[in-house]
Amino acid sequence: MGVKTTELEIMIDPNGNVNIKVKGVKGKGCIDATKFLEDELGDVEEREYTSEYYEEEESHTRTRVSY
């Protein structure tokens, strides 16, 4: 199992508007990845979802069965 990388691209325009783009996260995990920034910066005015948002999230749980 390889290491997964989450990348946040943060852009601030001259008016102080912040845009955050998340790469490397499938499903609704992208919202969790930016929550700490959103909490500090204020209300989200608009949210656009990439194709990764609509992909199935990968499970991070391992199950071991012994007989």
Image: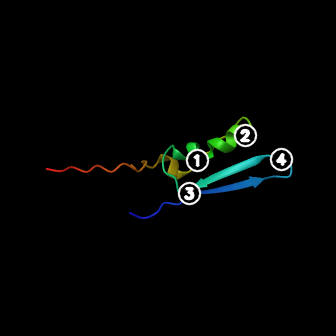
* Residue 53 sits above or below residue 2 on the image: above
* Residue 59 sits above or below residue 45 on the image: below
What kind of colouring is applied to the model shown?
rainbow
Label 4 environment density (alpha carbons within 10 Å; few <14, some 14–19, many ≥20): few
For label 4, the SS is loop
Label 3 environment density (alpha carbons within 10 Å; few <14, some 14–19, many ≥20): few
Q: x, y percentage for residue 47?
A: 64, 41
* Left or right for 59, reference 34: left
Residue at which label 3 appears: 6
Say what amino acid the circle numbered 2 marks. Answer: Glu
CA separation in Å, label 1 and label 2: 13 Å
Q: Residue at x 72, y 35 (%)?
A: 43
Q: Residue at x 74, y 36 (%)?
A: 42
Say what amino acid the circle numbered 3 marks. Answer: Thr
Closer to the N terminus: mark 1 or mark 4? 4
Closer to the N terminus: mark 2 or mark 4? 4
CA separation in Å, label 1 and label 3: 8 Å
> CB of mark 1 within 8 Å of CB of mark 3?
yes
Closer to the N terminus: mark 3 or mark 2? 3
Residue at which label 4 appears: 16
Residue at which label 2 appears: 40
Say what amino acid the circle numbered 1 marks. Answer: Ala
CA separation in Å, label 3 and label 2: 20 Å
